[in-house]
Image (spheres, rainbow, N blue to C red):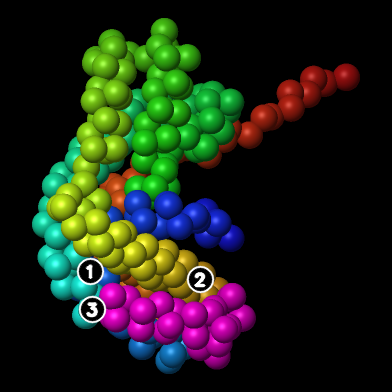
Amino acid sequence: MPRNSRYVTDAQLIIIGRRYNCDDVAEEANEALGRWRRDLPVLGSYGHGRTALAAFEADIATHASLRAARPDAVTDKMSAVVVRDQRVSEAWAWVDRVGAVLGTLASADQTLAIALDAAVPRDDAGLEAGIHALATLVVENKDKVDQDAEADKRLAEVDPLCAALRASPATVQTSKSRTVADSAQIDLFDGKLYTRIRDLNAAARSAIRNGHLQARLHEYTFHRLKRSGNPNPVTPPAPTPVVQQTTGA
């Protein structure tokens, strides 16, 4: 099962959806819909059958209605995305750097490798918690970290980074409470569509690799939301297997 296929709350979906331009999400979703309909006979056996397709179509329709009915909210969100994108990118850069430092240590430490794999955030929704988890690992392994890695400097950056993430506007705050609430609804459906497409892509790519689906891998990737999440995710090393030492009789 793909690592990202897990329960996501509405609050987390809103956080994820904040990252994206509504129009880009709509275009990505409609392109994914075409591939899904085409490959439905195979994708159904990978958990993406008619019921899931119908739910996706319904979300696309709701998303379109929200955008058409609330143009002010869409405009506000598009402006806010620019600010948030910069702050999120800075946070992911911190994760990249610290993950690489810890990854070097984890290559010879199975316990750290397991902890690092759990700590590294998978998407924007888990970014702040992931930063704190990685910082804890830095503190615990500070005596092993190379001086050039500037562990103290990285730790000092944690609070400002997280504060910036919390302060980054999901919407441009206005005196119109309805505009703010409408933007949150748009964020929610941006997040829903993004996660559905993400999981569809993962399932389809598995089917392609297994020889069950005759399509090209690059078809089932994000084409318009390439800046989503971490552009260069750190892949922690796999836990080092424990080798049982044997001695001759």
Of 83 and 62, the residue lying toward us:
62
118 on left or right of 19: right
Query: What residue is disc 2 on?
Result: 203
- Residue type at numbered disc 2: Ala
Residue positioned 78% across, 24% down in the render: 246
Of 38 and 131, the residue lying toward us:
131
Tag 3 secondary structure: helix
Residue positioned 29% across, 12% down in the render: 152
What number is the disc on residue 227?
Answer: none
164 on left or right of 205: left
What number is the disc on residue 69?
Answer: 3
- Residue type at numbered disc 1: Cys
Question: Horizontal and vertical percent for residue 241?
Answer: 63, 34
**Which residue range is magenta in the image?**
40-66
What number is the disc on residue 22?
Answer: 1
* N-terminal label among 1 and 3: 1
Image quarter (top left, top right, bottom left or bottom right) of the C terminus: top right
Q: Seen from this angle, which residue lies furthest top?
A: 143
- In the rendered structure, does residue 95 fall within the stretch colored magenta? no
Question: Horizontal and vertical percent for residue 115?
Answer: 53, 30
